[in-house]
């Protein structure tokens, strides 16, 4: 219980630090939301700044923002998407990113772990080489290239999948695979090295010498331990994938959250930058906390360490 | 692992499942003969026309709402909601008579007060509309906008009866007839805004009176318009597409792929790298655009403060060579007033003359060792910068240091510490030379050149105050001469073209020089 409380407290402090740093950094970047190719009269700029409270001293802006967020759960209005609040923008675009991220992460866990285990148990033979070539390609190839190639092959040449947009189930397939490719590759490599490490431990030898069938040794004894480093990576990876990928959303025209992050920065839409960054940080903190808690479930030694 | 074992492994099962889903989901989308589909590069930032400032919002707005006037394909002013107008002999009073029987989508009749309400909202300090300055020529409009005048009754905008709108200007401004075509001046329903607040632009709440009305808006994904049955020329547009579907497709290449796959009918803003190839397609349409690109000099910057340095740099530029780096996208042009406007003069501006350039350069005792050239980060700007760098080195032997910055950082930089040489562009708000030449007056916030010339400013005042076209052309031409040839504050390089892919089933697609077109004028085969 104390552990959970401590973990929550450190999470909140992290979020506070993120909010402050983001605020300071975005204000340090030259150019403001009202700079454009048509210069505005200074009086109009002053009115706009007053409207969005940008005329106040920086600390009042910051504390006002935090106060409004904590007390009212309000992320403020978007400066450049007129008439939409940041809360609305998040509410409309986050589910899309979550859905896509869910497909991608599920796919990457399935494919990555399977590839990793296959490679490890067939170390030095063709399944290992094949799996690792796939994995290294997945890590090395930038996603914009994979996305473009996928569109070219599956949409343009083969015509079996739509090139972009987010209308029906068929529109989910290509972006989910492309988005899941890199995490799958990372997981595959990690699982492989992790399984290899565990395979040589004494308790595995014991299990084998007891005459347990190889499958039981693998699935019951090896995988459980081998999964600990994978879990460590999986936490932040899930947070990243769920909050969306700018490249994937951009190339496939998906109305997700990541686009708003980039658009927010480009437009200097301060409340949007703050809102999306904080949301992303919350996901990351939550994912790390979940991983911390799951360690205890997967590895009883962790629980004992804490008790001791 | 044997093949048999592999087949039984979870990995192969996952692969089979995936392929199964792939196959099951494969389907071909049919083409709807009543719906025209167009790409939008972003979600419209605002459909509140008092506050909208961008071309994406404009694309939607000008199809769902009308102004007093509009520009036809030849950029001539034609009546829209105004049936007619008169301009007083002193050029200061505009009296608009509204078209009769125009109804909003809820059936309410359009009255002149709707314009007064709109313009009052536009100028209200609390609205803080970025484009409120478009009305600053009107008597007391600027004072009201700045909060110095509290009573809107003192502003020169009056509805004398339900059908008559009278606008009084501070000084005569010949270009002013173009202003009521700009979207911020469209009439508005105060009652609708009062009822729904900033949610009035949602499909269920919005009241408009254009040829189409807003049917659905899924942010960042699509926006659907349907024909407005209460439109005042409903019968005349009976053959126009029943629905317009805008799809938000941010990536240019993706838009092209969707077009090629038959999922979009109109795509604008093509990816520069693909333009040379796309230009060979029968669906490629390039139209003139009132948008110019120039190299600016900061005339007080040590590197280029000497007029001869600027002249040598200008003479050394071969615009045809620059244009070659952006094939099919631009047309070389030395006049700042672009073709298609009065006062356009192809002879204006400094032309390419490498021999003269070198002679002048060599005659300068104190030459700058290097010259800084800045641009905002964009592929095309980089190509232009590298070409200019090359040309200047080749012709004059001068080293030019090119540097780039992100757009908003760049704008701040131009404002705070302008470099010796920089690139900039300008697109017309209204098709009058005033809109282009006004940029370089002493007071202009868009003037990053440090050029300030009383004669130039005076000529612009004379030109805008005159109703005589010949007199105006003469004044603008003289102003251009000062800007481009005498002082050499800027060197125009080229005018841009508006590039589109338009499906062959679309007929009647002819945007004017400001890129405006109306879906009501299109037909689907």
Image (spheres, coloured by chain):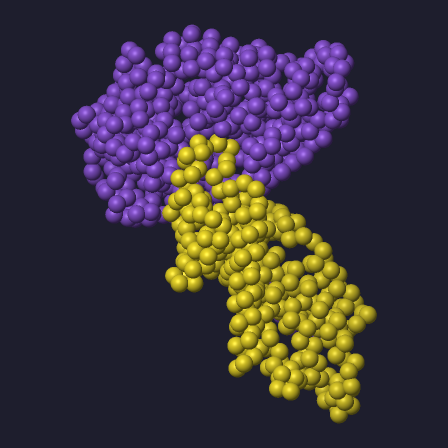
Picture residue at 36% right of the left edge, 26% below the top: B136
Residue A274 lies, with reference to residue B6, above or below; the image says above
The colour assigned to chain A within the rendered structure: yellow
- In terms of depth relative to the viewer, which is nearer, B271 or B263? B271
- Please count the marks in the image: 0
Left or right of residue B104, residue B325 in this image = right
Picture residue at 28% right of the left edge, 18% below the top: B93
Measured as percent of width and height from the top left, residue B46 is found at 40, 42
- In terms of depth relative to the viewer, which is nearer, B479 or B247? B479
Q: Residue furthest right?
A: A124
Picture residue at 41% right of the left edge, 35% below the top: A44
- In terms of depth relative to the viewer, which is nearer, B258 or A27? A27
The answer to which image quadrant residue B348 occupies is top right
Q: Is residue A26 visible?
A: yes
Q: Is residue B7 visible?
A: no
Picture residue at 57% right of the left edge, 33% below the top: B416
Residue B175 lies, with reference to residue A10, above or below; the image says above
Measured as percent of width and height from the top left, residue A168 is found at 47, 56
Left or right of residue B109, residue A80 in this image = right
Measured as percent of width and height from the top left, residue A84 is found at 40, 50
Measured as percent of width and height from the top left, residue B263 is found at 49, 44
The answer to which image quadrant residue B429 occupies is top left
Residue A153 lies, with reference to residue B518, above or below; the image says below
Left or right of residue A46, residue A104 in this image = right
Q: Quadrant of the C terminus of chain A?
A: bottom right
- In terms of depth relative to the viewer, which is nearer, B359 or A10? A10
Q: Residue furthest bottom?
A: A210
The colour assigned to chain B within the rendered structure: purple
């Amino acid at each position: 219980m104390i552990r959970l409380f401590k973990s929550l407290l450190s999470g909140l402090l992290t979020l506070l630090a993120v909010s402050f740093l983001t605020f300071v950094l975005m204000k340090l970047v030259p150019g403001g939301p009202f700079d454009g190719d048509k210069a505005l009269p200074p009086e109009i700029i002053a009115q706009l700044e007053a409207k969005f409270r940008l005329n106040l001293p920086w600390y009042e802006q910051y504390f006002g923002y935090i106060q409004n967020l904590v007390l009212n759960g309000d992320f403020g209005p978007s400066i450049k998407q007129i008439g939409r609040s940041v809360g609305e923008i998040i509410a409309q675009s986050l589910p899309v990113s979550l859905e896509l991220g869910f497909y991608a992460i599920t796919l990457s866990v399935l494919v990555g772990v399977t590839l990793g285990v296959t490679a490890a148990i067939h170390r030095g033979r063709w399944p290992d080489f094949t799996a690792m070539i796939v994995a290294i390609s997945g890590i090395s190839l930038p996603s914009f290239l994979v996305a473009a190639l996928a569109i070219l092959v599956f949409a343009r040449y083969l015509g079996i999948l739509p090139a972009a947009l987010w209308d029906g189930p068929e529109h989910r397939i290509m972006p989910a695979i492309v988005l899941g490719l890199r995490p799958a590759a990372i997981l595959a490599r990690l699982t492989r090295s992790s399984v290899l490490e565990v395979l040589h431990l004494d308790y595995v030898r014991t299990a084998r010498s007891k005459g347990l069938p190889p499958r039981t040794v693998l699935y019951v004894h090896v995988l459980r331990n081998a999964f600990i480093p994978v879990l460590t990576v999986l936490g932040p990876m899930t947070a990243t994938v769920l909050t969306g990928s700018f490249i994937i959303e951009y190339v496939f025209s998906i109305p997700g959250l990541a686009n708003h992050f980039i658009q927010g920065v480009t437009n200097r839409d301060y409340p949007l930058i703050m809102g999306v960054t904080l949301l992303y940080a919350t996901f990351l903190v939550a994912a790390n906390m979940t991983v911390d808690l799951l360690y205890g479930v997967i590895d009883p030694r962790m629980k004992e360490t804490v008790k001791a | 692992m044997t093949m048999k074992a592999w087949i039984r492994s979870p990995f192969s099962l996952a692969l089979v499942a995936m392929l199964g889903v792939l196959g099951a989901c494969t389907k071909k989308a049919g083409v709807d003969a009543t719906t025209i589909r167009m790409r939008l590069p972003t979600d419209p930032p605002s459909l509140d026309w008092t506050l909208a400032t961008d071309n994406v919002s404009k694309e939607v707005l000008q199809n769902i709402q009308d102004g007093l006037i509009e520009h036809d394909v030849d950029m001539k002013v034609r009546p829209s909601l105004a049936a007619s107008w008169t301009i007083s002999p002193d050029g200061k009073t505009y009296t608009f008579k509204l078209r009769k029987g125009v109804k909003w989508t809820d059936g309410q009749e359009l009255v002149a007060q709707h314009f007064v309400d709109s313009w009052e909202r536009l100028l209200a300090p609390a609205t803080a509309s970025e484009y409120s300055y478009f009305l600053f020529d009107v008597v007391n409009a600027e004072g009201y906008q700045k909060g110095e005048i509290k009573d809107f009754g003192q502003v020169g905008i009056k509805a004398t009866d339900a059908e008559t709108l009278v606008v009084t200007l501070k000084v005569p401004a010949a270009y002013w007839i173009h202003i009521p075509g700009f979207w911020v001046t469209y009439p508005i329903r105060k009652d609708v805004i009062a009822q729904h607040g900033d949610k009035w632009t949602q499909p269920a709440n919005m009241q408009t009176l254009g040829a189409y009305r807003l049917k659905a808006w899924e942010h960042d994904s699509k926006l659907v318009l349907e024909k407005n049955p209460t439109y005042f020329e409903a019968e005349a547009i009976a053959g126009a597409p029943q629905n317009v579907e805008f799809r938000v497709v941010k990536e240019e290449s993706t838009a092209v792929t969707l077009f090629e796959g038959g999922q979009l009918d109109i795509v604008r803003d093509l990816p520069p790298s693909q333009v040379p190839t796309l230009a060979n397609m029968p669906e490629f349409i390039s139209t003139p655009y009132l948008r110019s690109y120039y190299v600016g000099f900061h005339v007080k910057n040590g590197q280029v403060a000497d007029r001869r340095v600027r002249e040598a740099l200008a003479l050394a530029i071969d615009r045809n060579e620059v244009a070659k780096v952006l094939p099919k996208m631009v047309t070389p042009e030395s006049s700042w007033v672009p073709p298609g406007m009065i006062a356009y003069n192809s002879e204006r501006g400094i032309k390419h003359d490498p021999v003269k350039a070198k002679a002048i350069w060599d005659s300068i005792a104190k030459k700058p060792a290097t010259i800084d050239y800045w641009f905002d980060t964009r592929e095309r700007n980089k190509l232009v910068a590298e070409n200019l760098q090359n040309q200047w080195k080749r012709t004059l032997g001068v080293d030019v240091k090119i540097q780039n910055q992100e757009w908003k950082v760049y704008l701040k930089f131009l404002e705070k510490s302008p470099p010796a040489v920089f690139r900039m562009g300008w697109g017309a708000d209204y098709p009058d030379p005033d809109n282009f030449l006004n940029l370089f007056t002493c007071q202009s916030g868009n003037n990053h050149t440090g050029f300030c010339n009383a004669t130039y400013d005076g000529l612009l005042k004379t030109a805008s105050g005159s109703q005589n076209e010949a007199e105006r052309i003469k004044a603008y031409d003289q102003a251009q001469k000062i800007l481009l040839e005498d002082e050499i504050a800027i060197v125009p390089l080229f005018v841009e073209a508006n590039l589109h892919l338009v499906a062959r089933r679309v007929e009647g697609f002819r945007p004017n020089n400001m890129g405006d077109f109306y879906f009501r004028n299109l037909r689907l085969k």
